[in-house]
Amino acid sequence: MSEVAVVGFAQAPNVRRTPGTTNGVEMLVPVFHRLLADTGLAKQDIGFWCSGSSDYLAGRAFSFIAAVDAIGAFPPIMESHVEMDAAWALYEAWVKIRTGEAETALVYGFGKSSAGELRRIMAMQMDPYLVTPLWPDSVGVAGLQARLGIDAGLWTEADMAEVAAASRRAALSNPDAQLAGETTAEELLKQPYLADPLRAHDCAPITDGAAAIILAAGDRARDLCERPAWITGFEHRVDTPLLGARDLTTSPSTIAAAKAAGVDGVQVAELHAPFSHQEILLRQAFGLGEEVRVNPSGGVLAGHPMFAAGLVRIGAAAAEIRAGRADKALAHATSGPLLQQNLVCVLEGH
Amino acid sequence: MGAQLAAVIGTGQTHHTAKRLDVSMAGLCREAIDRAMADAGTDWADIDAVVLGKAPDLFEGVMMPELFLADALGATGKPLLRVHTAGSVGGSTGNVAASLVQSGVHRRVLAVAFEKQSESNAMWALSVMPPFHMPVGAGAGGYFAPHVRSYIRRSGAPNHIGAIVAAKDRRNGALNPYAHLKQADITVESVQASKMLWDPIRYDETCPSSDGAAAVVIADEQTAKGRPAAWIHATAMRTEPTTFAGRDQVSPQAGKDAAAALWKQAGIKDPVSEVDVAEIYVPFSWFEPMWLENLGFTEEGQGWKFTEAGETAIGGRLPVNPSGGVLSSNPIGASGLLRYAEAAMQVLGRAGEHQVDGARVALGHAYGGGSQYFSLWVVGSERPGAR
């Protein structure tokens, strides 16, 4: 079985609004340029391309086809696309490399949330016969989950504010972050509710962004960078879509994926938690102790490019390995209402 | 490194029709899945992962429907992937599912693809006009008609070739219990008498809009050995941009490259003599000769002669679309996986009335976008290398 590593990562600045189209090209072109320059690869050196995006977010059919224009895909390329966060595109690429059909892969994701009303768009992910017709607001739905956890004694509003404050402080060292600053939980708790018990800082911001990662196999990875971030566990699972049929204060799919991937001994974790209480929920699901650094990038509360944010978690965790700040790192991505689908990627510097 | 062997051990599909108002999306998928699971003799505990393929979400009006379908797909508690590569997606779904086994990650994978166009309006979904892009407001027929005209001009093909393909595929569809359109009495003359929609494409040369689903169970060597199996000999996918100066839209380079990679991987040197049957994505009749050339079954400009000589009919040198193909059933997202499943059914000897005698090697083909996405596989009744 071939070893596969992350050898390069780049992302567009996370911003509230970009002037470009919803197909990501304007954000992706500079990201590809930077990533290829950093690894010394040309586009012809990439054996497999895979992307993640959403037509509903883009407000049109086939947005991912238009995104291919960012590549300059002639001569033709070996390419695929998932209608999911690009973390799952990275999974498909990892599988492809393991078949031996490709030695390198470039994976990208993009999302321009500023083009529509995200809270309404996300309602389109629910059961179209029984739930979507009620147009449940995505922040309101998350508020129900936060309330359940508070009532169960699993977290408090102060704990949630502490997560948000830590995100803002960590993001000061992340030049691509959308929200960063010196603040405290005490300050944040003075803010009004957005959807009780959630305040604005408890919710990931509306972000336009894109990101890309290059994977390489074995010796190719060693040639391309000094300290590749080797993927030693890669698992994902999905839970039932029926919100009334699962315990919303935990995440069975995360726990199952973590067990299969082997997360013991991780020193740092990048968690895809679009709401502050979900970071606490995920820490509990993963069983992360105090010694584990969580979201040194600031996480998605500091910037949440839809359909790229999960991939960014893997890129940020790999950056911790590649810089030698950790020997074993955990990256997590989520999709679907209230953490329905979860992916776990374990990276090591061995 | 090197891929592990993988094989199709079961296939299933729905009865395809314009509006399956008797079932929800979940029910539609489950109909195909239950048939595939029964055909494979597998139970849910045997399935390690599920891959769902579907064309644009706007076709049903649900964002990422695999999420709300997770229970119905039997995916809850398991890995679930959602593939979308335009019209080629059914083929890509098969290829991704195969790669999950070939990589050694999983042992048995369920691949499902569906489209339920009656839930929304595909024409509307294709008519959103994003800035800086050529509008496709006239639908797929209007988009592809100029490519067909260009093919006719370049090849010098006579006008009735498209009608030959349409009459053949609809008659084949009459042999397929699942086909949307079953027209046993259709003739070349009646096709030529049907209404002109997008010159030179007439009404009877056009695929229907269907509700439908397809499913296949793909297994590793240990599971597949000693039982009927369609061994996967090769898979290929290629993409090129929709438009650029000098692009050959009639015979795109991405299709040629995908075919070359496929034949090489399958160890096939002369496709027309080594492949016994082909399920090719032909949504408009003229695409049969166009893809015969693009795939390397004939020389450039010769595809129409092969069709005209009757070589693509059941009993011909290379039967193409004995199932009736996309011209008889077109649940868009599932159409590619139907081609893949029908290829597997042929080498398994399970194609019923449209079985091609002695089929041992079969091609499944799908294309999408503006003829820019290509997904292919070759399956055989014997293990790769055993021929």
Image: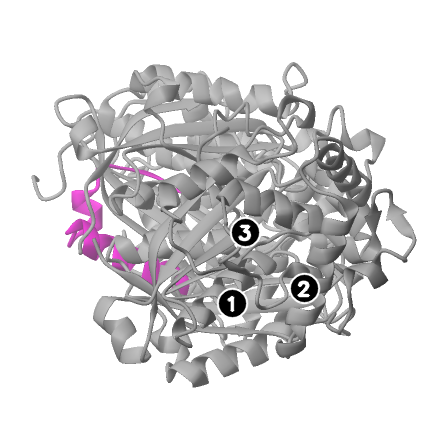
Q: Secondary structure at mark 1?
A: helix
Chain letter for the residue marked with disc 3 in the picture: A
Eyeballing the image, is B330 above or below B369?
above
Between B169 and B32, the one lying in front of the other is B32
> Type of residue at label 1?
Ala
> Type of residue at label 2?
Ser
Q: Which residue is mark 2?
A: A167
Mark 3 residue crowding within 10 angstroms, few (<14) / some (14–19) / many (20+): many
Q: Are marks 2 and 1 on the same chain?
A: yes
**Magenta stretch: includes residue B267:** yes
Residue visible at 41% across and 25% down in the picture: B172
**Magenta stretch: includes residue A219:** no
Q: Give the extent of the magenta segment.
A: B254-280
In the rendered image, the quadrant that contains the C terminus of chain A is bottom left
Eyeballing the image, is B60 above or below B47?
below
Q: Which residue is mark 1?
A: A316
B121 lies left or right of A219: right
| Picture quadrant of residue B66 | top right
> Type of residue at label 3?
Ala
Visible residue check, residue A238: no
Q: Earlier in the sequence, mark 2 or mark 1?
A: 2
Q: Which residue is mark 3?
A: A333
Residue visible at 49% across and 47% down in the picture: A343
Mark 1 residue crowding within 10 angstroms, few (<14) / some (14–19) / many (20+): many
Is label 3 or label 2 in front? Answer: 2
